Image (cartoon, rainbow, N blue to C red):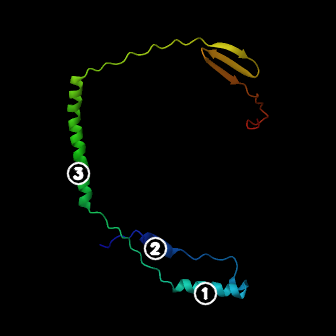
Amino acid sequence: MAEFDPLDPLRDAWQQVEAPQTDRELCDEDATTLEAVQWMASAWQQIPIPEFRSEQKPKAKSLVWRRLALAAAALLIATLSWPEAEIADNQTKEIVAPPLPATPTAAPARLIANDEEKIEILSGKVRLTMLRGPVASPETDSTDY
């Protein structure tokens, strides 16, 4: 069985690409430009495409399975020893919950101001101010204001 090269799909796709078509002919250019383009095209055609092989070797399956088995064993040991440690801690300590602080009663809300521009409500130390916006008419778009 042949070894899989990760660059094979890229190489196959590159070979299927067609050269782009220009919107004008090169014969309209001056002699210097023609000479430079011909030189560049011949230079690119003379360069061989290097073969590239990945230096990475696939990891041995046994090493992966060993690490997985080691992690599973460590997890099993930790899981089995957990209840014993929890029982030992519960037998030596008595858990006492701290008393809950008394919740202050909220002051009743009072309406301070209610006019065309705003509404103000006061409750204890908290003041809520709600500003009134312009009234939208059916003719106006809601993004206009």
Q: Which residue is mark 3?
A: 69
Q: Which residue is mark 1?
A: 39
Which quadrant is the N terminus positioned in? bottom left
The amino acid at mark 2 is Arg
The number of callouts visible is 3
First in sequence: mark 3 vs mark 2: 2
The amino acid at mark 1 is Trp
Please, what secondary structure does the residue beneath circle 1 have?
A: helix
The amino acid at mark 3 is Ala
The residue sitting at 70% across, 86% down in the picture is: 27
Q: Which residue is mark 2?
A: 11
Please, what secondary structure does the residue beneath circle 3 have?
A: helix
Instruction: For label 3, count other residues whose C-alpha is less than 10 Å away and answer few (under 14), some (14-19) or many (20+).
Output: few
- In this view of the protein, which residue sits in the foreground, 52 or 11? 52
Please, what secondary structure does the residue beneath circle 2 have?
A: helix
First in sequence: mark 3 vs mark 1: 1
Among the 4 quarters of the image, the one containing residue 88? top left
